[in-house]
Amino acid sequence: MNSFFKLILLTLMTVTLFACEEQNIDNQQVNKVKQETKDMDDRKYVAYQKDPLKDPIKKSHENLLNKYATFRLTTDVSHLSMNQRSMLPLLIDAAKIMDELFWLQSYGPKKTFLDGIKNQQLRKFADINYGPWDRLDGDKTFIDGYGPKFLGANYYPKDLNKIDFEANAKEAMKGLYTQVFRDAKGELTFSPFHHIYATQLKQASALLNQAASLAEDEGFKKYLTLRAKALLNDEFKASDLAWMDMKSNKIELVIGPIETYEDQLFGYKAAYEAYVLIKDLAWSEKLAKFAAFLPQLQAELPVGDVFKTEIPGTDSDLNAYDAIYYAGHSNAGSKTIAINLPNDESVQLEKGTRRLQLKNVMQAKFEKILVPIANELVAPTQRKYVTFNAFFANTMFHEVAHGLGVKNTINDKGMVRTALKEFASPIEEGKADILGLYMVEKLYKLGELEEGEMMDYYTTFMAGIFRSVRFGSSSAHGVANLLRFNYFAETGAFSFDEKTGHYSVDAMKMSAAVTSLSEKILTHQGTGDYAGVKQWFAKKGHINDQLARSLKRINDAGIPVDVVFEQGMKYLQWAD
């Protein structure tokens, strides 16, 4: 056994002993937490119990699995030092704990559920979806005997009265890191995540502290230490600020309760997830210059001055990475190809955000999904405009655009996130998509985008709509793309040939639609127009007959909807 693998083995043994020791020391506290949440645990999963008398298979499991193309997460890690290599299994083990916690938030205990599925292909599909609901098909059940997925997942009691909750719930019950349940008397109460999941979070925290002891980059060491502490108290701002300050680390970890998409009832609650990433130094250097344009781009947004008084943080940066591990929310259903964090509005205004482009996963989706879609639906004369560079840029500027516009309403309705409630996430994704393309136009005219032409970005963007619409109405990205498809169709940004079934972009009308749609979304957000957004989603957030035929054509061609990963230490490239 060489010295490197001896070091990994010793590290894993140390972490296991440390975690066990920590758990024994705090048994009393863990028992207290269990007692406090007993009533919640007794009721938590009752709505999802399966009727054993029913046939468990609703659809052909072979067809279900065909929705996903398998892709191996790997990269060359031979340039990492011995300490950096030894950190990777620790970070991946911490990510696996986030995976366990997301199962509990979205469905319930993983093992009990999966062990009840005898067919291995169906079991794999259930594992991909973190439960019996198809995340790429509007959360429809694919195993008989289960009811519809509760929009509030496991964040709230299943009998919650939404209107009553909004009117009377304590503010803490609407917090990102609290879970709402009923006490023994049937009254609403709540408990913070770090109490409910204390045992698992202590184990994850210990792993991050162990990784921090091996970190050679001081910024990464500080982040890991603060994040380890934050997992235990749900106070994440200090670690978010430290994460923003990191510049030179070769390894990246995103971990914790972060995005709110799983809470489709209100969009209040965060879901546990994790990414372990390796920085692509060459690509990152190419992207570094774009963050400096944010203040100028904010000032030039196509909306009234009152909507752009907030100044984006100038400490934002752009980097490219190869992903080596996804866990929890990020791994459920459709897979993220770029990250824009942190979500804390105060951190965004103070320091901006970091944009992480996941290049290897992006390449996989481009080759396995986007190009085949273009070959089916894009007019032959325009297929040459569908390029990876345009796909990468459109995705990258989508993430950059999250930092533009408004975080707080202009009329004292509070933050946009809370004013628009369950519509906040999908309209934010719609904003980022359309402002991303708006930014591409601006930067192209300034001569900052050296490769390709604007038709590349327009045509690739259009093809990307068909890719994302397939994520379904349960996905914030899917709904955002439905709204945009219908808007573009109405404004003539693209035309449809009924005879051939092909779409063609009209560059001038596309540019005009980008501007007008940007203004529409920014106005809805800035005014906190919940009623207006709700009406828009109700009227235009659906698949029309033309789009349905196009999507059927894609499906009949056997084009996968998304990717599923082979991932873990054994897939990494170690040789120098």
Image: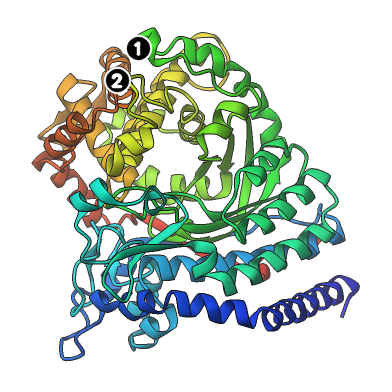
Label 1: which secondary element: loop
Q: Nearer the viewer, residue 313 or 321?
A: 313
Q: Name the residue rendered at 26%, 20% in the picture.
A: 520
Give, as a three-letter code, the residue at label 2. Answer: Thr
- The reply to whether residue 463 is in sight is no
Q: Give me the disc on residue 166.
A: none
Q: Nearer the viewer, residue 108 or 284?
A: 108
Above/below status of 173 relative to 355? below
Above/below status of 232 relative to 466? below
Residue 46 is situated, as x and y percent measured from the top left of the image, at 26, 78
Residue 120 is left or right of residue 495, and the answer is right
Sequence-earlier tag: 2 or 1: 1
Residue 540 is left or right of residue 77, and the answer is left
Residue bearing the label numbered 2: 523
Above/below status of 17 relative to 297? below
Q: Give me the disc on residue 303.
A: 1
| Quadrant position of residue 126 | bottom left
- Looking at the figure, which quarter contains the C terminus? bottom right
Q: CA distance from mark 2 to mark 1?
A: 7 Å
Instruction: Work out which residue is located at the far bottom of the displayed protein and give it.
Output: 53
Q: Nearer the viewer, residue 492 or 195?
A: 195
Q: Name the residue rendered at 28%, 66% in the picture.
A: 187
Q: Residues within 10 Å of mark 2 (few under 14, many from 20)?
A: many
Give, as a three-letter code, the residue at label 1. Answer: Val
| Colour option used | rainbow
Residue 99 is situated, as x and y percent measured from the top left of the image, at 51, 67
Residue 372 is left or right of residue 294, and the answer is left
Asked if the residues shown at circle 2 and circle 1 are in contact, with their CB atoms under 8 angstroms apart, the answer is yes
Q: Name the residue rendered at 17%, 86% in the picture.
A: 55
